[in-house]
Image (cartoon, helix red, strand yellow):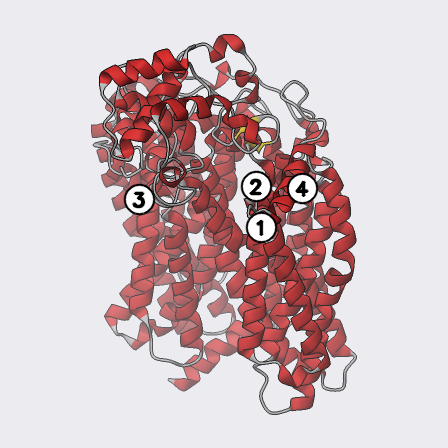
Amino acid sequence: MIPSPDPLGFALPPWLIQSLAYLTLTLHFLAMNFTLGSVILYLWTRFRKDEEYRGIGHFLGSGLPLGVSYLITLGIPPLLFVQVLYGQLFYSSSVIMGAFWIQVIPVMILAYLGFYYFKFSRAKGERSRWPIVAVAGVLLLYIGFIYVNNFTLTMSPQKLLRLYTDHPGGGVLTHGEPSLLPRFLLFTGGSLAAAGLALIWRGIYLRRWGMEDEADRSQRFGFRAVLISPMLWAIAAIGLLLTQAESLNAMWSTTGATLPLFITGLLGLGVTIFFARAAVGTSSVRSPLIASLGMVIIIASMVIFRDQVRMEVLRPYFTLSSVPVQAQWGMFVLFLVTLVGGATLLGVLMVKVFPRMAEGARERLEGIAESD
Amino acid sequence: MNYPVWDIPFLGAGLVVAIIAVIHMLIAHLAIGGGAFLFIAEVWSDRQSNGDAIRAWLRKYATWFLVYTTVLGAVTGVGIWFSIQLASPEGTSLLIHQFVFAWAIEWVMFLGELTVLYLYFYGWQKNSRRMQIFLAGAYFVIAWGSLFVINGILTFMLTPGAWSLESTSIWAGFFNPGYFPSLLIRTLIMFMMGGLFGIIVATRINGDDGFRNRVIRFSARWVLPAAVIIPFLLIWYWSTLPQATVDLFREGSTGVFGGRLEALNRYFWLAMISGFFIVLGALVIAIRPKAATTAGAIALFLIAQFGFMGAEFFREMARKPYVIYNVLYSNSLWKHDSEDPALMGEPFLSRARWRPEVEPMSMEHGEWIFRLQCVSCHTWDAYRSLGQRTEEWTPEFGSRWLETMHESGVMPPFQGTAEDRAALSNWIVSQHGEVVVEPEITGTVEGGGR
């Protein structure tokens, strides 16, 4: 029993909407992983209480408000496209856990304000307020958990009615779905790798500015962080194999997408680790760029894999091809024009402004070094 | 009925939407008007002898502006989306499927304005003057572009114009009759908000009174275009409203003297009176800037918040009983269904997907009709309390009232049979402590007739 799809149908063929969802969700997960990873690594540098890591901690802590800003902004389009594709399931599951779903908003505001408060109080020279970062990090994890709950619930149409009639106020969160935690771990597991790669990039610029020691520290620490993520992903993969073997088998027999996606993800992982290692000790952007592309491939494979599993699980109830298409090609072209125009403008502005901002960052860093 | 209804006690789903929307609307208007303010103030500072002092003040403005708009503004914007999914999934689905690329374009604008704001703010000390002015201007243009897009969807809900389920032309829906007056009114209000925010930050300037007064005057002038032009735009906006809304307002106004004031009228006057006090306050501040205090400036800002509350509630109430005018009722039931006699003759729960198996004419029968047809707008004991409104009901009266409630103009027609009405009425009466026993229920059904 699931609601009917919207009578207006899809505004584009579903594969195109899926592609847009894959692209933007990949970007969202990258921003989310970077932010969460920055929180974890920042706290780690605090607990080490080692002056050597002061610069790294400063860099990671400073990026938190921007990280949250882009994780929110890049989270908007995938949420839009998922409502187009699976709206009837998504709205139902959101209502069923409505009391939790709406909490995302105040909790996100608290976390975001916390990061800004931390950043500005530190800029004023007040004593470090790392507990705020810790609490805000936990709040981000809580939001992630609510999200995973909701999207996992969309894949259990058989449970929806019972859950609703038992909890019409939307007060149900976990619902006995064994794949919940592996899914949560799969999508947060890349956090350390994303923040680690950011540190490797930082090292490239530090080396160019002649700060060899700090560059070495940043890149070595970053690379070690990158190596932790595959372990978390492995645990998540085993969890998924144990809890979703049936749908994975079904996916294997119908679309055959399981193995190619798995291999692509592994290749991405290999590329990320190999080139992240190669980037340590260099000032060339080539290796970190390829390592970052590897990371994009890993996350994109997971995003596509996730959607393929969803389609497979929902096949008895609903297929995308059953929904009529009332194409809005004109609006789509207008969107593309706006996107390309906007991206070009931002690209040009960044090229002009970033070198000056980097110069400012360098001066601040030199200030920190001198104060030591 | 396609979707479950979020039954949140005390607040009600509608109030959750309203709380988030009212906060967001004020910040969203500031986020755009503040961009224009930053741009003009940047240009102004270059023409003044004490440009550095003005820019130091602008830096403070930009810091508060950045945190306020990117944290509270952005997240409450997403919050509106979350809350409307819960309050009206059917309506949200229609809007998303009709305007998906309008929303996607608005997202591009949002991404653009955010990034440009960061380049402006974080590049403050290193960017050239020309670049800073360009970034401030670009921010305003892009941010206003996001209004240009979202305004089409907002006004569509009240005045969909030539759009219908049979003729789903996106342009007819987007550039609907209310589009342009609303766009212009909102643009002027944005300038006003940018100025009000400027006054608050300017009152914190210490030391140089002459400089403080000049900056306060500069900020207060931003309120004036709205004061002068909006009354004319309101006449235009009024002419685009559905006739039923205008009628409701007229009757509500007449009723003021008879002791009755419709919610629609109350919200309208709240917006108007707030606007009047803001203009009055800004005029006093412009004439006597020395009198401006931070507390007074914040009070003006809070009055603006009340004004937004009035305006947004008015827009909401003007749509009643629809969520998308003439198409979809606030309780997620379609208008075309209510015009289909065959459907109306069917027991309501037989076409409701989200309900347990219930005994016909049982209390559960009535409770689930309450949940599926009433809870979208009413709670039992608090917001738009149904308990309060039905204190004097008897089962027979309630059943008859439900049959004709749509004639009030603000309620949707009841969907279902006489048995459904009786079951709902009995359940309501039972919630007041009246014992409604089985024979009486049967009597009610017979009394209500089919």
Q: Quadrant of the N terminus of chain A?
A: top left
Judge from the rendering whether residue B96 lies leftward or rightward of residue A49; answer left or right: right
In the displayed structure, would residue B244 be above or below residue A71? above
Q: Are marks 1 and 3 in contact (CB under 8 Å)?
A: no
Q: Quadrant of residue B157?
A: top right
Tell me the CA gap for discs 2 and 4: 14 Å
Tell me the CA gap for discs 1 and 3: 39 Å
How crowded pointer 2 is (Cα within 10 Å; few <14, some 14-19, many 20+) is rated as many
User: Both on one chain, marks 2 and 4?
Assistant: yes
* Residue drawn 38% across the image and 59% down it: A110
Chain designation of label 1: B
Q: Nearer the viewer, residue A11 or A269?
A: A11
Tell me the CA gap for discs 2 and 3: 36 Å
Question: x, y percentage for residue A114?
Answer: 38, 64
Chain designation of label 3: A
Local SS, label 3: helix
Q: Quadrant of residue B187?
A: bottom right
Q: Nearer the viewer, mark 2 or mark 3?
A: 2
Question: x, y percentage for residue B72?
Answer: 49, 58
What amino acid is labelled 4 in the image? Answer: Arg
Label of residue B250 in the image: 4
* Residue drawn 69% across the image and 62% down it: B191
In the displayed structure, would residue A324 be above or below residue A159? above
Q: Are marks 1 and 2 in contact (CB under 8 Å)?
A: yes
Question: x, y percentage for residue B207?
Answer: 60, 92
Label of residue A145 in the image: 3
Question: x, y percentage for residue B61?
Answer: 59, 72
Q: Nearer the viewer, residue B178 or A39?
A: B178
